[in-house]
Image (spheres, grey):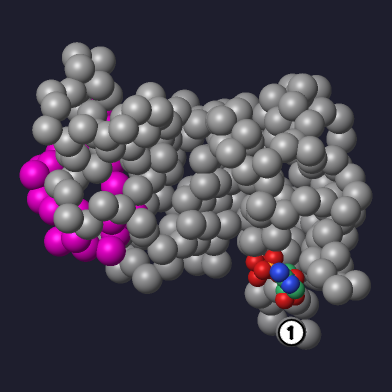
Amino acid sequence: MTATGTLLYMERVSVSFDGFKALNDLSLAVAPGEMRAIIGPNGAGKTTMMDVITGKTRPDTGFVLFDEVHDLKGMDEAAIANLGIGRKFQKPTVFESQSVEDNFVLALQGERGVWPNLFGRPRAREAERIEELLALTRLAPHRDTLAGSLSHGQKQWLEIGMLLAQDPKLLLVDEPAAGMTDAETAETAELLKRIATTHSVIVVEHDMTFIRALGVRVTVLHEGSVLAEGSLDHVSANERVIEIYLGR
Ligand code: ADP
């Protein structure tokens, strides 16, 4: 593997907690415009990997390059976010007492770094972006609904849209389908596919129906390393993957 032509490049990254290796020589390359699914049993190192990419956890050894030139190893979380890495945690965090539209306004104003002014009129470009985000997330019919009144799925889509307001190059999404109905899960796969036409996405997920709907390259983590990589059908046929998932 080389860093050439990658958006995110991790080489032989290790992280230990009290002598326990949560990541063990992990290498991963994600291309610009690629959506990658990360799967693996509990404790495989998925969260630690996301923490390393966003600067929450520093690798003990190895390195992480973003856009081929930025070595993330010495950077703090804010600096990494500013390079264009957005992270969606599992639980939705939206401004519950504000409307869907005002949540997007706040997210866009956050991008400009000004104190949000809910009572001011959005500027023309901002109004255009709000319409784009409402269309992308399919939340236009709910633009005046208070975010606190949305369904779980709609809140997740709203927060994903708010992250996009900050125009990241790479979006990390942690178990977006958790707690969703089948219909919401299918909608979420469609939303991520729309996003992946313009952004790189790394999605950690347990739900195989969801991964299949995404139809993307899958990386299987196990004990802090990459166990298998390829299409879902390819990794599902791997003996070791079958062993760790079925406990044989
Ligand atoms: P996953 O997200 O795949 O379930 P994690 O990255 O959360 O896996 O964890 C990988 C391993 O590292 C687990 O065994 C976990 O207990 C351990 N671990 C993660 N974070 C810490 C921490 N802050 N302190 C000690 N052990 C940790």
**Residue 236 visible in the picture:** no
Image quadrant of ligand 1 equals: bottom right
Decide if residue 59 is on the left or right side of residue 202.
Answer: right
**Residue 18 visible in the picture:** yes
**Residue 17 placement (x, y as % from top left):** 82, 69
Which three-letter amino acid code belongs to the residue tagged 1? Gly
Q: Is residue 154 magenta?
A: yes
Q: Which quadrant would the C terminus be assigned to in this image?
A: bottom right
Q: Which residues are magenta?
A: 132-158
Along the line of sight, the residue nearer the viewer: 142 or 147: 147
**Residue 222 placement (x, y as % from top left):** 77, 67
**Residue topped by disc 1:** 247
Decide if residue 15 is on the left or right side of residue 232.
Answer: right
Q: Name the residue located 78 percent from the left edge and 31 percent from the top edge.
A: 71
The secondary structure type at the circle numbered 1 is loop
Q: Which quadrant would the N terminus be assigned to in this image?
A: top right
Q: Residue furthest bottom?
A: 248
Above or below, 145 against 206 in this view is above
**Residue 63 placement (x, y as % from top left):** 85, 40
**Residue 18 placement (x, y as % from top left):** 86, 73
Decide if residue 23 is on the left or right side of residue 124.
Answer: right
Above or below, 230 against 222 in this view is above
